[in-house]
Amino acid sequence: MTIAGHTDAFEKLRAEVLNRVMPGLRHKMLGKLQPVTLLSQVLSRKLSLGSADHAYVQTQVDEIKLNARLVTAATQNLFTWVALDAPVQLAADDLLSECVDLLKMDCYTNHLIISNHVTSRQQLPALEVRMLICAGIILLADKQALEKTLEIRATDHAIQFKWNDACNGSASSNPGMLSNWDWITDISPRCQIEKIDSGMQFNFQAAA
């Protein structure tokens, strides 16, 4: 399947990013499902033993309903990661926090210390932000160096990466397109990426 308005390079990059973040997405999804299972099992046991009064049952049911809503929200969010249609706009701070948290799981950041300073509630295209920001973090994480640092900030519709000299090396453990920055030119019509001093700036297209 193709993504309307995107290049073949973007689709290839998207496949690499999803391969990297899917274990984290799966872990988060399972984390939302487990409370529903546990609460249901406890309530079932109490009812079978005849030791649950009305107040207890109501409390447990309310907890199950609350966690079921969290599962629904997590499922909908997962679909927005993999869906190829219905573009979604989300707040910049939510998108950046999600990307950073996913890539920090299971030590995927490989000696890369990330400082996320994004607090903007500016609405940005979720698909492009997730794929391109995660791609940039993965690229830096896979650089074979120690004491790497990355600062992430936001201005209007732009996300800015600033890194230290340790991130400038050419050696990478990544055999794919994320071994270097060659892919940034015309990667997406909804984002122009430009090199800046000791970093990179992702200029996302404003919502219509």
Image (cartoon, rainbow, N blue to C red):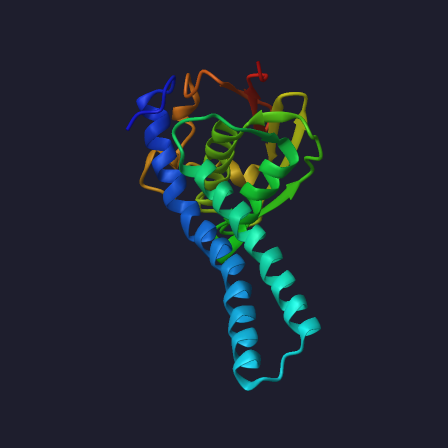
- In the image, residue 4 lies at what x, y percent? 36, 19
Residue at 40% x, 46% y is 20
Residue at 49% x, 18% y is 190
Give 72 or 175, whichever is nearer the viewer. 72
Task: Say left or right for 160 vs 128.
Answer: right
> Does residue 203 appear anywhere in the picture?
yes
Give 78 or 169, whichever is nearer the viewer. 78
- Residue 141 vs 10, above or below: the answer is below
- In the image, residue 66 lies at what x, y percent? 62, 56
Outermost residue on the top side: it is: 208
Quarter holding the N terminus is top left
Give 185 or 199, whichever is nearer the viewer. 185
Residue 52, picture quadrant:
bottom right
Residue 196, picture quadrant:
top right
- In the image, residue 195 lies at what x, y percent? 53, 21
- Residue 58 vs 132, above or below: the answer is below
Residue at 63% x, 62% y is 63
- In the image, residue 98 lies at what x, y percent? 57, 43
